[in-house]
Image: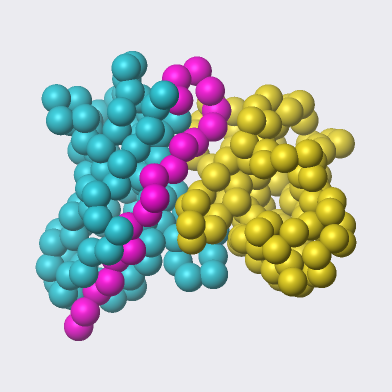
Amino acid sequence: DAGVIQSPRHEVTEMGQEVTLRCKPISGHNSLFWYRQTMMRGLELLIYFNNNVPIDDSGMPEDRFSAKMPNASFSTLKIQPSEPRDSAVYFCASSKRGNYGYTFGSGTRLTVV
Amino acid sequence: AQSVTQLGSHVSVSEGALVLLRCNYSSSVPPYLFWYVQYPNQGLQLLLKYTSAATLVKGINGFEAEFKKSETSFHLTKPSAHMSDAAEYFCAVSPYNTDKLIFGTGTRLQVFP
C-alpha cells in the first residue's frame, strides 16, 4: 500500500500564476479530503468528496480555488490566480466512508512570492 | 456546531514522565473523537479513535484516551514519554452525520532527556 500520494512536495510560484496540486488516494477509499495548514489558522477543511462527488466545499476560501475528482484515483486542487496569502501546506487525505480513520498524504508546501 | 478545544499549545515533559494532552469537545450528540500525531514535515497519522464503543481507547505507540461524557473530555495519555514522542498532536471531532473531521489547534509535545 503506497498510501496517499501528493505531488508536488514543494511548489514555489509567483503571484498571479496558476497552481495545481494533485492527489492519488488509497485504492478502495471512497472519501477524499483537502485540508490547508497554516500557523495562523491551523488545519482547515477546504472540500471533501464521497464517491467522486463534492459534498461540502464550504471551506474553499474563494472562487480562486477549485477542486475536481474526475475518478476514484485522482483529485486536483487548483488555485488561479495564486496570491501570497495562499502560502501553506496543503494536505490530501482519504478514507473508507464511515470508517473515520483518515490516511493523510505528506502534503504539498506551497509558497507564493 | 461541534468543535474541540485543546488546552495548552505546548507541553514539555521529561523522558519517562507521564504525558497528558487535554482535549474538550462541544457537542449536543454523542460525538466521534480522534487523536492524530504529526511529525515534522509529515502528514497526520491516526493515533486512536472513539466511536461510541468502549470509553477507554487504546492506540498506537502506547497512547490511550478516555471519553468522559460528564466532563466533555477526551484527554490523551501515555504513562512514560519517549524522545520519539516529540511531535504535534491534534484532537478532532466528526460532526454528527458527516464524514468530515474538525481539528483542534494542536499541542506541541517536547520531551527532554
Task: Tell me the quarter of the picture where residue A57 sits.
Answer: top right
Task: Return the x and y of residue B53 as percentages of the image width and height.
Answer: 30, 25
- Is residue B63 left or right of B44 when viewed as pictured? left
Q: Quadrant of the C terminus of chain A?
A: bottom right
B109 versus A55 height, above or below: below
- Is residue B56 left or right of A39 when viewed as pictured? left
Residue occupying the point 18% across, 75% down:
B15
**Which hue belongs to chain B?**
cyan
Task: Return the x and y of residue B95 as percentages of the image width and height.
Answer: 45, 25
* Res A35 seen here: yes
Looking at the rendering, the stretch of residues picked out in magenta corresponds to B95-113
Task: Return the x and y of residue B41 as percentages of the image width and height.
Answer: 54, 70
Task: Return the x and y of residue A66 as percentages of the image width and height.
Answer: 79, 41
**Which hue belongs to chain A?**
yellow
Residue occupying the point 54% across, 58% down:
A38
Q: Depth check: A22 or B102 in front?
A: B102
